[in-house]
Amino acid sequence: MNAKPRRAAHRTVVLGGGAARRGKRAAPAEALQPAKLSRAELYKPPTNEELNRLKETEDLFHSSLLRLQIEELLKEVTLKETKKKKIDAFLHEINSLLSAIPETPETELTDQGWLPKDVKVPFLQVPFSVKGRFHFMPPTELKVVGSYLLGTCIRPEINVDMAVTMPREIFQDKDNLNQRYHRKRALYLAHIAQHLSKQQLFGSVKFAYMNSNHLKPILLLRPQGKDEKMVTVRLHACPAPEGATEPPTPHYNNSILCDTMLLSHLQFLSSAATDFPGMKDGVALLKVWLNQRQLSKGLGCFSGFMVSMLVAYLLMKRKIVKMMSGYQVLRSTLQFLATTDLSVTGISLVKDVDPSLPVLDDFQQAFEVVFVDPSGLVNLCADMTASKYHQVQFEARYSMEILDDRMVDGFQALLMTAKPMLRAFDHVFHLKHVSKLQGTCKKMQLLSELMDRGGNYVAAALPFIVSLLVRGLSGRALLVVHSLPQTPEWPIDAEPPKHKDVGPLTFGLLFYPDFAASMLEKGPQADHPEALDFRTFWGEKSELRRFQDGSIREAVVWEANTAYQKRLIPEQIVRHLLKLHADIPESSICYMGALLESVIRTGKEASGTGEEAMVSVVRAYDDLSRKLWHLKELPLMVSSVQGVHPALRYTDVFPPIPMKPIYSFHAQIKTKHMLLPSEKKPCPAYITPLKMICHMEGSGQWPQGKDAIKRIKAAFHLQLAELLQQQHQLVCRPAVTHTDVYKDGYVFRLQVAYHREPLILKEVVTPEGMLKYQDTEESRQLEVEIQHMPYVTSSLHGLQQQHPVFGSACRLAKRWVSAHLLGDNISEECVDLLVAFLFLHPAPFTPPSSPQVGFLRFLDLLATFDWKNNPLIAVHKRSKFAAARSCLPVMFIATPKDRWSSMWTQERPSAQILQRLTVLASESLHALEEQLMDPLKTQDVKMVFRPPLDFYDVLIHLNPNQIPRHLESVDQPVKSFSRGVVKNSTADKILFPVVDYDPVQCYLRELRDAFSDLALFFYDKHGGEVIAVLWKPLSFQPQPFKVSNVKGRMVTTLNDKLVCVPNVEAILEDFEVLGEGLVKSVEARTEKWTI
């Protein structure tokens, strides 16, 4: 193996808040220079260490790339030595300041007059009166605890924890009762805060709750000036260690005991970390993993401390040995989390059995998740709900699958991709007003839990609400999770935050795609004892029903007629159960499951989003295919029929609706049984021809000349029309290139194909008389039409059968692209393939089970995928891709049938359009996520479908009555026009309707033919009222005066030379003349451009 000096790839890591931090380049001194080695050194045998590394890489990592990526990530997140020195100096100064704080005289606990007015006690003193006395004495001991000493703290948020031991003298015997201990702790911190806030050393002195637990205020100190962001020192006040007397069952005692153990936990962890360099790396990787999944902050989170304790537990149980590397520690810990359910069987760090300690079963009864510390008295997971642990377990299980899958870039999926709730869960809903949970505690009789949690009704009610939802959605949802309540930090002169200040609570549901939309909850048989329980759980929704097998059971049936309504059955369940059992009114629940789907509905009364319309199109298509196969009297049989139109793969944005024309609305050509648009009426409704390819069987009789083939095909079109009319009474209209068939209210366009025709079109005779084959524009076009289009349509039709929401996700994506006027600049197939990629390669997510999530991930893919350096859906080696990059399209999509040409992106999008798409996607995603995560604002999700028009130079406003698809616009038009059709699918004998007639598209074609060298034209084909024009900058440079340069230009003199410049006024006038009757006005934005 010949080792080459490698340059470490520089990566950006997204941690915690998810804002990408641009790492600073290493100083030039560290830059890797190719080493100059003598011949002897070049060929010396590898050392033991090098051999070990090679062996380990081979056994552990799928590739040496993963190892390099992980090392690079660790460099990126660990603290640099220079920073450590600054932080140490800061800690020394804090130490000396704390020892110098003066004592205060002893007063009653309730007499807090000695505190100045500008410092408020960081504790909710409810009720205020309580016995006990307090005076301040300087701390007996100050010690740094936590991840800073162990070397496992990671950037971007560096927190250093400092334990301030309060002297024994300030406590009395019964201080563990009635929050007396907690209040003394808060007063102790308030006095420290008052003194430190006067010092110049600190940039800010604030309070916060530790992990959002309101019994545990801590003091945050940050340095002055530009170093303020460098570090946050967190002061924890803790009592001097004493033997505990009471058994620590509930949360209240647990919170007192936790403080007494701070120092012993540190000693325990540091003994585990000695001689174990892999632990430091492993814990850092696990923290990144938790941060990306939003699991490491808030009340009941899976904190970095807990992960460190878990690694220490695995070390104690010999599941991890000190020889392991950081990556092995990561894998072993994820493996343990994936296979162990701590909400069923707890684990304990106690080494020796001590009869005086409580046993695991005691903990199991008091807490949902159990992980006992080395003293045997504290449950580290006291605040965690079973649901949160199940989420950690699910993530760990899925992460292990990703790591074992060689087809997935595990590093990117596990450690570099953030998983915000909106994109990770199929449906998300918010509980707007957390204060409503007070009523829940009353209704569910949770008084003792409320006492135990010190009055925190959010923490008391949350586990019960989640278990209620888990039971109600048991067959439908794989996971029901909740966000972690988080309280912000606050300045020392402000009142501490109340329980309701955690803001809205968010819940996420992850579905089993097959059962999420089922309309029936089947209960037990009526005479079984469980039937009563089922009835009380579902309330008046439960009723007796008789099933086909003769059994009479309790059942709940949900109302839903369309696919769209069925997808929202979980919303009905959530609202019903929370109202019934938790007293939470519907107005407090803000359900974000399907808000976006309103943009693919037409008409005010439409209850569905077009899935049913698509199914009936496919049904009519299948029936017509059968009729074509069995046609008698054709000279050659139809060997196969393949659909091409997007509606036949369920991805047409607005599927066609069966229509029958109103004759009085049209002009008629009686001889040909055809209708024409009438000049006096609005433009008729747009009827899309559904294109199908008919392959005829092979035969030696086919001619070999290209013109002859075209004539034979025209004859077939005529004969197909005649036979369909005779044998099946279908109204047909034949043409040279196709035959249109009116069936069930739809118009199908049949195109005959002969499989050797593309090959014949490639034939070229050289001047020497040799016959050779080369691609021509015509042959390429035909290949796409008769081979590739049908293949894509049938593959995506198959994908829709596996993932029922695929079609709707595609439709949202295409509606968005079109709404931003870019529909003509990127092909429909290209967007469909991008969405297909999200369903086929979803890691680190699961495949979407709701259209909205599919759409959000589509925006994320567009905004974040590295189009420049990577092909999408790669099924071949990337090295070849990199070598040929310069001559490949800017957006490269490879499919199994088309690995090398990326045909759907060959012509479009151009680099500028792709750049525009990524910017729009990134802005839209940001705006949408902000709206969907904030239930207190009004949700106007259509905002991201309204294009910004200030970017364009000229706007051509159109006359709405000549826009046939006017009703498809994002905002429903106030005034709609009759379009001369009635919805109907039964008519047989009719005059043929006007097909594929859209005046705006005809106008656009003329504009592009005439002015494509001067301007670009953008339009939303789904009912847009504006054509936006962008001048091409190069065309505005003066050109030398030649006859060939005169089109659209006028002659002027520049520096005594005759030159041509665009004649803008004449061009704008041409825009109006060309679109007479269609164009309402032309708005020129003169401030944007000069000549």
Image: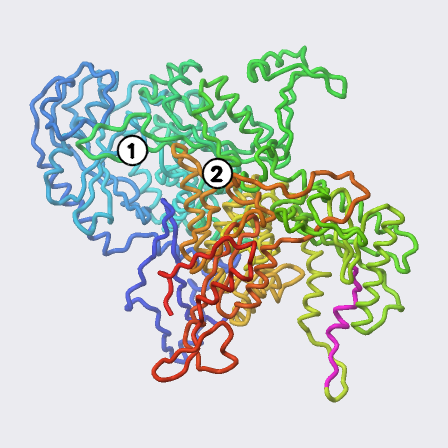
Of residues 14 and 898, the one nearer the viewer is 898
In the image as oriented, which residue stretches furthest toward the right? 633
x, y percent for residue 87? 21, 49
Does residue 52 appear in this view?
Answer: no
Residue 644 in the image: above or below residue 931? below
Asked if labels 2 and 1 touch by Cβ distance under 8 angstroms, the answer is no
Q: Which residues are magenta?
A: 752-766
Splitting the image into 4 quarters, where does residue 692 fall?
A: bottom right
User: Is 753 inside the magenta-drawn segment?
Assistant: yes
Judging from the image, what secondary structure is the residue with disc 2 in? helix
Task: Give percent across and percent down for residue 500.
Answer: 33, 26
Res. 210 mark: 1
Point out the residue furthest to the front here: 680
Q: x and y percent of residue 535 in the render?
A: 59, 14
Q: 27 or 1054, which lies in front? A: 1054
Q: Tag 2: residue type?
A: Leu
Mark nearer the N terminus (1 vs 2): 1
Residue under the point 38% across and 25% down: 434
The mark tally for this picture is 2
Q: Label 1 is placed on what type of residue?
A: Met
Which residue position is annotated with label 2? Answer: 337
Query: Dot 1 lies on which element?
Result: helix
**Magenta highlight on residue 1069:** no
Residue in front for this viewpoint, 52 or 927: 927
Image-based side of 462 in relation to 629, left or right: left
